[in-house]
Image (cartoon, grey):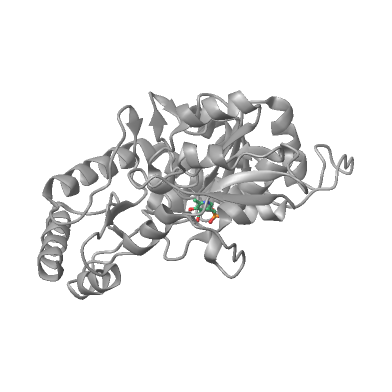
């Protein structure tokens, strides 16, 4: 079976973890501080605060901007539930907007239609590694004096006009879950432009204290450990090369695939292909996926149910593009551990299934 995702863990990661374990200092410490400083170079030097997951990063990002009960945050429904969960966990209301069917990211016009006096922020997702339409969303947010936040969980090193995601909005959250473009085991990073907001994130991460036993606000324990930061630091050094390989693999897939809708890359945007997601426009996507698996190619549906229709939300809304995407999207392998032979096998299998089932 050709795997859909494959975290690449080598001796460097093992050595880094051993070093931390042998040091005896396992909790948040110097490795976390180093990881934050190093990751800052991926986001134009903005302040970075490492936490224990991407979900925590989103949650603290929203809280640090004082988002809470009575506020609304516009998000896409076509995403992982964490995007909306983080909003709901602050006590604010997620307001679900439709996507555009080309980029599969938040549609700025749909977002605009949902603005209300309670809207505090718009939080697009750079889905599958393709940046949302940040230039138009920036304009929208500036016109209405609201925050633009980025769910960059899937989009490390993606960019718009050479400005990296994480540096395009007022703040952003990244995930380092094992299947992401780089991992720390579990982990996340909050990125903000404003040092005072970064300080609030640091307080909320650590029981509300910067100095021991001087708790300034009520906070959580959402710290990253030095063990995880050590893995993240090694992986970050390889991220550029892995991203180039992902993009090369994607270009090869796009050149070879027939009979399915291949992913687009908007002019001036840099897609980092966390997922290579085709759309099965003719025929049944789930049958397509099963047939592809039976030929030895692992594939996945991200996401079969739009967030607004999950039992945890159950909002009665019409989001036509979101529903089409949920019924037709299928992610196939693109990760940097794929061999040339495997890439050819994926192309051959997808084309054969498309021919059989159309
Ligand atoms: C779009 C999106 N947002 C948020 C998250 C949450 O990240 P984590 O799993 O690290 O909590 C993920 C990752 O799964 C994601 O894909």
Residue 127 appears at what percent x and percent y? 42, 47
Residue 63 appears at what percent x and percent y? 73, 43
Specify the quadrant that holds the C terminus.
Answer: bottom left
Tell how many labels. 0
| In this rendering, position of residue 9 left or right of residue 62 | left
Residue 299 appears at what percent x and percent y? 29, 64
| In this rendering, position of residue 283 left or right of residue 203 | left
In this view of the protein, which residue sits in the foreground, 18 or 281?
A: 281
Specify the quadrant that holds the N terminus.
Answer: bottom left
Q: Identify the residue at image location x=10%, y=60%.
A: 348
| In this rendering, position of residue 285 left or right of residue 204 | left
In this view of the protein, which residue sits in the foreground, 232 or 153?
A: 153
Q: Identify the residue at image location x=35%, y=35%.
A: 240
Q: Quadrant of residue 237?
A: top left
Q: Quadrant of residue 61?
A: top right
**Is residue 23 something that shows in the picture?**
no
**Is residue 311 something that shows in the picture?**
yes
Residue 60 appears at what percent x and percent y? 69, 45
Up-down: is 47 above or below 71? above
Q: Identify the residue at image location x=23%, y=69%.
A: 288
């Amino acid at each position: 079976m050709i795997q859909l995702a494959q975290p690449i863990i080598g001796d460097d990661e093992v050595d880094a973890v051993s070093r931390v374990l042998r040091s005896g200092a396992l909790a948040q410490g110097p490795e976390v501080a180093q990881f934050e400083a190093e990751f800052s170079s991926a986001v134009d030097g903005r302040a970075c605060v490492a936490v224990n997951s991407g979900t925590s990063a989103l949650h603290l990002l929203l809280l640090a901007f004082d988002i809470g009960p009575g506020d609304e945050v516009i998000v896409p429904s076509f995403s992982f539930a964490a995007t909306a969960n983080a909003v709901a966990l602050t006590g604010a209301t997620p307001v679900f907007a439709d996507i555009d069917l080309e980029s599969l990211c938040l549609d700025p016009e749909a977002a605009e239609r949902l603005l209300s006096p309670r809207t505090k922020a718009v939080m697009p997702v750079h889905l599958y590694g393709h940046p949302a339409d940040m230039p138009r969303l920036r304009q929208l947010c500036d016109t209405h004096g609201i925050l633009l936040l980025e769910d960059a969980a899937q989009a490390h090193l993606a960019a718009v006009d050479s400005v990296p995601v994480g540096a395009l909005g007022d703040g952003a959250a990244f995930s380092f879950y094992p299947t992401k473009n780089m991992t720390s085991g579990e982990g996340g990073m909050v990125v903000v432009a404003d040092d005072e907001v970064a300080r609030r994130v640091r307080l909320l991460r650590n029981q509300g204290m910067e100095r021991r036993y001087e708790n300034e606000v009520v906070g959580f324990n959402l710290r990253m450990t030095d063990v995880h930061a050590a893995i993240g630091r090694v992986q970050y050094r390889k991220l550029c090369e892995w991203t180039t390989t992902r993009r090369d693999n994607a270009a090869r897939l796009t050149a070879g695939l027939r009979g399915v809708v291949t992913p687009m890359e908007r002019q001036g945007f840099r897609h980092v292909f966390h997922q290579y997601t085709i759309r099965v426009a003719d025929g049944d996507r789930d049958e397509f996926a099963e047939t592809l698996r039976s030929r030895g190619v692992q594939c996945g549906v991200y996401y079969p149910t739009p967030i607004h229709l999950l039992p945890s939300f159950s909002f009665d809304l019409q989001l036509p593009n979101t529903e089409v995407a949920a019924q037709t999207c299928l992610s196939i392998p693109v990760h940097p551990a794929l061999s040339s032979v495997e890439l050819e096998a994926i192309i051959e299998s997808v084309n054969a299934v498309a021919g059989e089932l159309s």
